[in-house]
Image: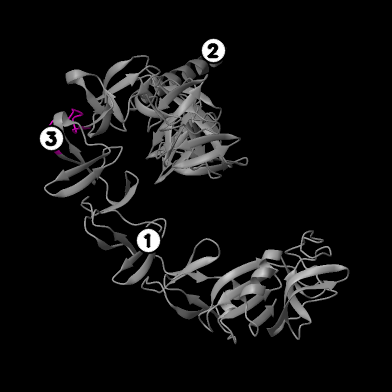
Amino acid sequence: MERQLRSRNGLLLGLLLLVFALSLIPNVDVFAADGPHLHEEDGVTYVYNASDLPMRSKWVEVDGNYYFTDENGAVLKDQFLERKGKTYYLGSDGVLAKGVFTVGKKTYCSNPSNGALYTAQTVVGVDGAYYLTDAKSLIQKDKFVTVNGNMYYFGSTGKAETGVVKVKNTYYFAKENGVFRTAAGWVQDNDTWYYVEKGGKILRNTIVWSKNEPYHVGNDGAVSGGAYKVKGVLKFFGKDGKLTSKVGWIKWDNKWYYVDKGAIVRVNNTAGSGKNLRYMGADGTYSKGIAKVGGKYYAFKSNGQKKTTTGWVKFGRKWYYAGKNGVLKCKEVLKLRGKVYYFDENALMVTGLQEVNGKLRYFDTNGVMQQKKGWIQIKKAWYYSNKNGVLYRKAKINDKGKYYYLGEDGKMLTGLILLKNNKAYYAKKNGALIVSRTFTLEGLKYYADAQGVINLNRAYGLAQQYDSNTTHLIMVDLSKQMTYVFKGKKGEWVQEMEFSCSTGTSAHPTPTGTFQTTMRTKFFDSFGYRCWYATGFIRGEYLFHSSPYMMGDEPKTCADYTMGTPSSHGCIRLKLENATWIYNNVEIGTKVVIFK
């Protein structure tokens, strides 16, 4: 027993001496730690447990931070760690990186809860901000993307932008989580209202209709005031973007507007009265311009005030003239220093061709009216003026012995000029009419008389190619069922008469060709009828004669009035008076030309 007591006492004394010795060694705790803690030794950080033993190859939480140790218990630092199929990053102090962190020049975002890097495109919320990662967990910047059906814009810092977001030249509205609003409707950002159309775009510089009321949104999409058009009408909006209810003068951006009922801005007209009378331009502000006040036109200066002095007034390239009290000349001819000007119904000085009191006149580029007789060239056209400055229209004139024809618009015409009754003139390139001679047109010859009149009947053109043994020539156009009688000579035939006729049917056709009259007889009988005043050609077998009449001593009862349609047995039927005219006036031996 005593031996045992001495042994125990010796052991206790040894322990006491050991404790005392250890207390003399600096920086060594006498008492063990309560849990895992960091320990620095020779520049290496270790993690020890509560028993001061190294924690090897495992995750360890120390003071809320996570570390990973190697097989010696040393903390891994500045490296990516692959662990059970997931990747992590341990910072320069060995702490597990969670959320946003930077490695070199690259910025990453890991899972804020467990620090694992993302392996697919993911939107991640970190400390109230949102980021977009790629398949390597790198933060994406300056990206306009759609993720899981939601639109985002991640800016230059990588954060999802919120509020009003500008992407290139388009504005959007993003909620606090960065998701763009895509449903149509109003949104508010910093006490300012915007309107998002379906699809997410914020409307800008336009009128937004909401609950049947118009609102104006400006260049940045925010509701704004000022004068803007609504369905083609300039209206005034207040600061809240709504139509103003005020009537009268409104000052906005140092400019004055006059607003009528319904928020309509007065434009291109006057506003106010007396000394406050102003001219409001197309944009609704003070402007120089021309306006009608009390049935009279006045000029207004750039400050909107009425001009009251006499004299010329110029706006842009337009000229006006102010008379007494500033009243502008309107629908009035004005003589100044021997020159004549005209001001139209809008008080504008006219130039060029103008209808003045029903007469066509020409005013040069300075507004001065042409006042001498003669030709005037306007662009590439020629006109002819009398000594009073009136231009001829739809008229034939004689200038220095030559005829010219002026059309309905006053222009000198060239080429074929059609008149009534198949008549025409023909003017050469210089405008002079062909007169008193034969000429060829489209392969046919025509004759222009001393006044330049031309007959355009096909028969007329053909006739000029033929001569005749008499002073007459007969042309029969089977296609038109017309007979023409000309007088004159070859190349100068002038139509004397024209008659509707009825020639042979298809069963008994009238022959075509060139013939001459050979005989005449007062009447002959055929098929129980009597035909009067016959002039024969082709050996007397074919004749010009009247329609068939009932038998008798005088032509009283016509048996067939047909004209203009083939109905004979080959002869050329005419009305009684026309057959009589040929019988009495056309000489025997006259050439007859029958054509189709």
Task: Report which quarter residue 18 is drawn in.
Answer: top left
In space, the residues marked 2 and 1 are separated at their CA atoms by 156 Å
Find residue 411 and name its label: 1
- Amino acid on which the number 2 mark rests in the picture: Glu
Residue 99 screen position, x and y as percent:
48, 33
Quadrant where the N terminus sits is: top right
Residue 520 part of the magenta-drawn span:
no
Label 2 SS: helix
Residue 431 screen position, x and y as percent:
37, 70
Q: How crowded is mark 3: few (under 14 residues within 10 Å), some or many (20 or more)?
A: some
In space, the residues marked 3 and 1 are separated at their CA atoms by 38 Å
Is 553 displayed left or right of 19 in the figure? Answer: right
Q: Residues within 10 Å of mark 1 (few under 14, many from 20)?
A: many
Check disc 3 and report the residue beneath it: 310
- Identify the residue at horizontal 49%, vertical 34% (top origin): 201
Q: Is label 2 or label 1 in front?
A: 1
Task: Examine the residues drawn in magenta and state their main secondary structure.
Answer: loop
Label 1 SS: loop
Highlighted magenta segment, given as a residue range:
299-311
Front one among 83 and 596: 596
Check disc 2 and report the residue beneath it: 2
Front one among 558 and 514: 558
